[in-house]
Image (cartoon, rainbow, N blue to C red):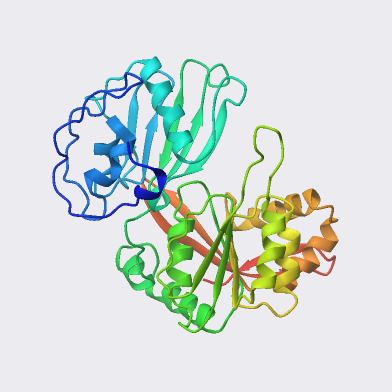
Amino acid sequence: MLPAADQARGGAGGPVGPPPPVDEGGVPWAVAQPAGRASPGRGAGDLEAFGPLAPYLALPDATDVLVAPDGSLWVDEGAGLRRDGTWALAEGEVRRLAVRLVALGGRHVDDGVPLSDVRLGGGIRVHVVLPPVSVGGTVISIRVPRAAGLSLDELAAGGMMTGEQRDLLRAAVLGRKNILVTGSTGAGKTTLLAALLSLARPDERVVIVEDLAELQVRHPHVVSLEARQANLEGAGEIGLARLVREALRMRPDRLVVGECRGAEVRELFSALNTGHDGGAGTLHANSLGDVPARIEALGALAGLSPDAIARQAASALDLVVHLARTDGRRAVSAIGAVTSDAAGRLRVQQVA
């Protein structure tokens, strides 16, 4: 078993090596190798701690590896989820594997705390739910970031955006516009945001605040801050709102919140309204038209009225980039400019 610090993906690609022995908890460390070759950025040795899940994480295009309550395993390689027929692991073994992965991330999961979310080496994110909260069996959901972030040009060449949209986004970043990237889960928000941030000048300091550090940015000066859960005694929690305040003391040229989901939106918009231009963040939303309502909902969590959050957002944000996923394909569906109407309500007007 590898310590968490040694789980970064790297090393030579190729087929997964011979299976190690069963671990002390009885979980077999290997299953049949799924079809496809290992990604050059995800060596099997570096994924050893994932045990029987390692071959699936090593697939070159894998973005999500999911174990369902019924024990089935599903993999998304960019074209939607597919069930793997070679996977076979009993519920007790799945649960022990889940507990071990969470422990490697420095957290715990048990009957008293049946849900946990951790980041392991290389930005691999593991979410676990145990019964009885998960009806039927243990659930393991793994998000796999790309071994190396793609550039904006590479994303455009791959069909994520048009040439016109690419040029607009590049100009926005170089012009230090504040950008909000929106979309549903798995739409590619993190991938696009990382590509945008990589366009920042090399002499700029990029400070990123995330619940779980996922952004991998090709830039020489990135500071990443990660929120912390409370310990077993209920002490030591450090939330996103506090991290945003702390980030402002770190001389950021660009302030980034990986995902706005609560009261931290107040601190982010306040910062972007007081000279911290060139910032960015992501937000879950179903469409470009739904973004104002989502921002108002987050403002309510921060104790702000709809009018107050609308004024803050209209002043803080320049562009909203919405991503959608259709038939397994992730793409920019719309780009909008943020304004407020005569009644003071937030509006996003599509511009591309």
Q: Looking at the image, is 162 positioned above or below residue 60?
A: below
> What residue is at 29 percent from the left and 42 percent from the top?
47
Q: Looking at the image, is 141 positioned above or below residue 212?
A: above
- Left or right, residue 177 beside residue 21: right
- Left or right, residue 105 beside residue 84: right
> What residue is at 79 percent from the left and 53 percent from the top?
302
Q: Nearer the viewer, residue 288 or 200?
A: 200
Is the N terminus in the top left, top right, bottom left or bottom right quadrant? top left
Q: Position of residue 134 (x, y in %)?
A: 53, 21
> What residue is at 46 percent from the left and 71 percent from the top?
196
**Residue 82 seen in this snapshot:** no
Q: Position of residue 93 (x, y in %)?
A: 36, 19
**Residue 46 seen in this snapshot:** yes
The image quadrant of residue 12 is bottom left
Q: Position of residue 290 (x, y in %)?
A: 64, 53
> What residue is at 82 percent from the left and 57 percent from the top?
306
The image quadrant of residue 31 is top left
- Left or right, residue 42 beside residue 273: left
Q: Position of residue 267 (x, y in %)?
A: 74, 63
Q: Looking at the image, is 164 positioned above or below residue 211?
A: below
Q: Nearer the viewer, residue 3 or 267?
A: 3
Q: Looking at the image, is 345 positioned above or below residue 326?
A: below
The image quadrant of residue 164 is bottom left
